[in-house]
Amino acid sequence: MTASNPPHDESRIHLDSTAHIMNSISSQLAGQLSLVRLDGRRRTGPPALVLVAHGSRDPRALSTVRTLMERVRELRPGLPVRLGHIELNEPLLPDTLASLGDAPAVLVPLLLSRGYHVKRDIPEMAAAAGARTRVAAPLGPHPLLVETLYARLVEAGWRTAPDADTRRSGAVVLAAAGSRDPDSAADTRRTARLLADRLGVPVVPAYASAATPAVETAVRSLIARGRDRIAVASCFTAPGRFATQCAEAAPWIASSPLGAHPAMARLILHRYDQTLAAPATEPLLASA
């Protein structure tokens, strides 16, 4: 009868878990030490990154945004990352800005095109708070946004190497929230063109509200053009009513919302860095 030893897998799991904890502690400690000078005085830290979400009654939206926020923190230890909502969820943006006091911050909208929220609501909330803030460009259009859209389509069943039949009969409807602002539609059209270049099939922008065409109309138009293998790409940050409605209109597959994909976290940090690098008087709302 041989002696009993702990299974090798259990030992590895224990070591991996311990290593993960130690790495996390080391990252946090390094972030704190970077804020202290050699003479013991505290350095001025980087401006806070404030993620500005729209807000939703769907509890999945808040959970998704919080997960995305954690991914941003993992990519940039030591960077203060906060969350504020335009409406419907707490914390609301004015409360988040008030909690920062006079500390500088960069507001990064979790919005995918220019529109009223980016141009008016967010800057007005920042001005009313009296905070030292700058507002970054929305997340789209940008290649990292397209990378996420592509990845979500592949997860839903889109072939990474489409054959001739798919290129001939396939198409995608890019489903977005919609806005009356023409700049928003222009940004969505540009995202659609970038995604079409990536996929090699037509991509038609369509909207859940406030703009045309509707997703159902875009699907019918593509079918009339002989495209019968049509996917819906969900151009929404998080799950919600609009994303669900658009997915239900898909005649074939529908991708999940963008969510906490790693490319989205990188895009958020890109917008933050881009804003800090630009002159304070330079408008950033049309940046790519």
Image (cartoon, rainbow, N blue to C red):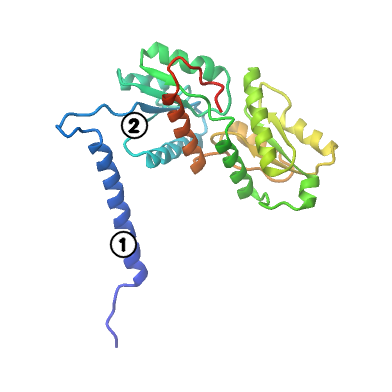
Figure check: 161 above or below 42: below
Give coordinates of residue 112: x percent, y percent. 57, 29
Q: Is residue 264 visible?
A: yes
Could you give the CA–CA distance between mark 1 and mark 2, rounded to whole angstroms?
A: 31 Å
Lower position in the chain sequence, tag 1 or tag 2: 1
Question: Amino acid under label 2?
Answer: Pro
- SS class of the residue under badge 1? helix
> Which residue shows up at 76% across the image and 49% down it?
166
In which quadrant will I find the C terminus? top right
Question: Amino acid under label 1?
Answer: His
Tell me where residue 141 sits by quadrant: top right
Circle 1/circle 2 CB separation < 8 Å: no
Q: Is residue 248 visible?
A: no
Residue tagged by mark 2?
80
Outermost residue to the left: 39
Residue tagged by mark 1?
14
Tell me where residue 116 sits by quadrant: top right
Give coordinates of residue 134: x percent, y percent. 42, 19
For label 2, count other residues whose C-alpha is less than 10 Å away and answer few (under 14), some (14-19) or many (20+). Answer: some
Q: Nearer the viewer, residue 66 or 46?
A: 46
Give coordinates of residue 103: x percent, y percent. 31, 21
> Which residue shows up at 72% across the image and 43% down it?
200
Say left or right for 12 vs 243.
left
- SS class of the residue under badge 2? loop
> Which residue shows up at 27% across the image and 47% down it?
26
For label 1, count other residues whose C-alpha is less than 10 Å away and answer few (under 14), some (14-19) or many (20+). Answer: few
Q: Nearer the viewer, residue 169 or 178?
A: 169
Say the numbered circle drawn on residue 67: none
